Image: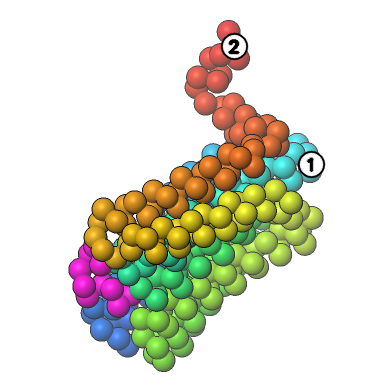
Amino acid sequence: SFPFWFAGVLNQIRKNVQPILLGMFSTITSVGIISLVNSANLLGRTAVMATRTSLRPTLAETLDEGDHEQTLHLYQATTRWVFTANVPAFLIMVLYPVAILSLFGESFEAGATALVIVVFAELASSATGTSGTLIDMSGLNVVKTVNKVFDVAFTLAVNVLFIAQWGLIGAAFAVLVSRTVVQVVRVVEVRIILGLHPYNWRILKPVAAGAVAFAAGKGVDELLPAGEGLPSLLINVAVVGLVYVGGIMLLGISDEDKEVFGELTRRLPWRRSKAKA
């Protein structure tokens, strides 16, 4: 359990690095803006954490049994789910960054560009899926610990370099670079050590649905600009969300998704009681 505790400590250090550096090299206003920007995709991040948490026991079981095929199905399906859950938040924040931040006051509108950059970081992170969870549950404690040390060291170095040069925008780019590099390293590790890759052709479903939703969002923004007030923003957001969900439903839910979902939920109390009956 020591590597998990140590990783948690390092994770807390990493989270607090950016506000401190922004306070040193930039302004207090920038600290407030980047804190809001980093919290903007809370819904998508919650979906990621829920998926990773539910995946842990099932993944540990398949790895312990040496079931390579089932582990691959779990890895690919949950990676796709994590990515799918983050696409609508990405679209909304890329389409309407100024309108969203203006809800918190005019001073926050200066963070619109930073918001778009950070949202790209969130999407890149979600696109690498559950590779970190796979490393955690595979017993590769040394790899996990080294990854966390690298994560904190690299994040600190990138933040110092970028924030000192570009302030708020530098902080946003530091998030994009550090998160993307760290996650890609994990994907490569899983590929080399376990021989697993996170993608199959079904990953194109959320990409296709997202492209259609983006076009719909741009169209409705031309007719009813999101910046005209909260009602307009909510209508734009609703259109993007409905078109995206509709696109996902039209493309269909695969048998693999149903199988993996059933596997992940079979430990739930109501599923266990039903099985006993």
Farthest-out residue, bottom:
165
Marking on residue 69: 1
Residue annotated with mark 2 = 276
If you read the primary sequence from the N terminus, does the residue marked by circle 2 or circle 1 appear first? Answer: 1
Give the residue at x 24% y 60%. Answer: 229
Q: Position of residue 232 (x, y in %)?
A: 29, 56
Report the amino acid beneath label 1: Glu
Magenta run includes residue 107: yes
Q: Secondary structure at mark 2?
A: helix
* Mark 2 to mark 1 CA distance (whole Å): 27 Å
Q: With respect to residue 104, does 260 lie above or below?
A: above
Q: Is residue 246 visible?
A: yes
Residue 137: x %, y % from top left: 63, 47
Residue drawn at the location 39% of the way across and 75% of the way down: 114
Q: Which residues are magenta?
A: 102-111
Dominant secondary structure of the residues highlighted in magenta in the image: helix
Q: Is residue 254 left or right of residue 149?
A: right
For the point 33% across and 75% down, the residue is 111
Q: How is the image coloured?
A: rainbow
Left-right relation of 98 to 209: left
